[in-house]
Amino acid sequence: MGIRTYHDPLHGGISLDSKKAEEEMIIELIESSPFQRLRRIRQLGPAYLTFHGAESSRFTHSLGVFHLARKALKKLIQIDPNLEKSKGLLYAAALLHDLGHGPLSHTGEWIFNLHHEEWSARLIREHSEIKETLEKLHPKTPEQIASLLESNSQPRAIKKLVSSQLDCDRLDYLIRDSYATGTCYGQLDLERIMSALTLAPDGDIAIDPKGLMAVEHYLVVRNLMYRGVYGHRLNIVCNWLLEQVIRLAKKLGPKRIWADQIMSIWLWHPEKIDIEVFLANDDIRTFYHLERWKEDAPKDLSELCKRVLDRRLLKAINVAFLNKESQLKALAISRNLSEKEGKDPDLCCGLRYHHLDGYQPYIGGLRLWDGNELTALEKASPLISSLIKPEDSSWLIYPKEIHHDLLENLRTF
């Protein structure tokens, strides 16, 4: 097979050498049908309705995570050669960490009530193509990778490269999502961050003080991306609309709307979702159903599908400045105003809460190691300390036709 190269818009050529056992395994995993399915799962779900360039896939992101994990491990092996034996484990875990994403990525997790980490682990343990490829490296490899994705494991440094507050997953998606959405937040100094990775005496990952500013920048970028992209008000609206579509479809039932065999199980018999049924659903199948329902479904469901597919989005305003009681009062006002406009408030009015975690110093917090002393990152950096506080928002969703009347009412609160 020789050298296989994937040309990435961010990382350049990602080359794999089939003469190396771990990289031959990665080539086979990439070519497997469960991994190829990730081409049909948008990285940012419905965010393309807000940022028109947000069309990249989980496939592209997963390759990027593998690439960064390989670079990071090469650096750490120089410090601890024993990590060489974990190469295959890290490579596969980095590549397959998102294998269990359903349609619409994280949006799909909310609307279908599934957890991609659990499905990733299950596919690694049970899907014959994935399992048999991993077992070529070692019979215990599938279980080791599944366990690594599910919980803390040893060696700690390998786990942290896959899932932590400074992991290869976050490093890739921050720069990739920034690039795809046309924002300028994600200009991370990857080389500086990689060169600053080191190992603390306990074997866990730490940061050389020379990389402090690059890591500060990374954590600020993460905060900005969550506030400006992932938590964008129109993203909130799109997620809410898709939730209403699936909620109403489930409520209407198979006697009133059409769904193929796969989607019928997802909607009305989720307990019967096995590996085959899970892998059969992706963005293409889900949006095909929205197209069908737009054309031939009861009026309420058809209207919701039109809003998504034709981008007839609702408006949203952050009412976090109000207490819970006043927020519910504002929702009641929006519902009354909508009814006066002849609109069904159940289809166009809602409250959506959004929580942004701050930097978490006590849950996998980062540390500086200068060769003599370990220092918690937030103790060395007032900037990082300022990012600890979480941020909550409460979005009132409503139709544009009532915008001015609603604002007039809110001024009296």
Image (cartoon, rainbow, N blue to C red):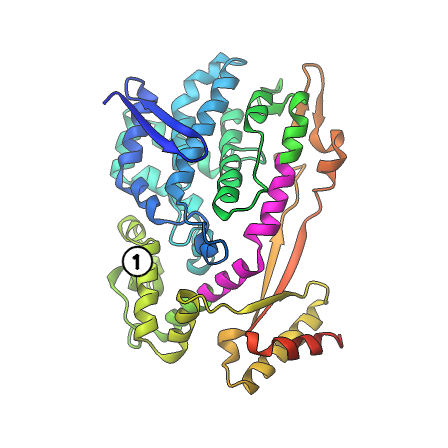
Q: Which residue is mark 1?
A: 285
Q: Is residue 67 visible?
A: yes
Residue 51's x, y, as percent?
Answer: 49, 53
Residue at 60% across / 83% down in the picture? 336
Name above or below for residue 50 compared with residue 381. Answer: below
Mark 1 is surrounded, within 10 Å at the Cα level, by few (under 14), some (14 to 19) or many (20 or more) other residues, namely some
Instruction: Answer with left or right where residue 190 lies relative to residue 133.
Output: right
Q: Nearer the viewer, residue 152 or 53?
A: 53
Name above or below for residue 396 compared with residue 275. Answer: below
Q: Quadrant of residue 376?
A: top right
Residue 396's x, y, as percent?
Answer: 61, 68
The quadrant in which the C terminus is found is bottom right
Q: Quadrant of residue 248?
A: bottom left
Q: Is 142 colored magenta in this rendering?
A: no
Q: Is 230 colored magenta in this rendering?
A: yes
Residue 201's x, y, as percent?
Answer: 62, 17
Name above or below for residue 67 compared with residue 353. Answer: above
Instruction: Answer with left or right where residue 50 lies relative to residue 276.
Output: right
Magenta span dominant secondary structure: helix
Residue 332's x, y, as percent?
Answer: 62, 78
Instruction: Answer with left or right where residue 297 lies relative to residue 362.
Output: left
Name above or below for residue 14 compared with residue 301. Answer: above
Q: Is residue 197 visible?
A: no
Part of the protein shown in magenta: 218-242
Instruction: Answer with left or right where residue 239 lies relative to residue 377.
Output: left
Residue at 68% across / 74% down in the picture? 407
**Label 1 element class:** helix
Q: Nearer the viewer, residue 112 or 395?
A: 395
The quadrant in which the N terminus is found is top left
Residue at 41% across / 54% down in the picture? 104
Residue at 26% across / 41% down in the picture? 33
- Amino acid type, mark 1: Arg
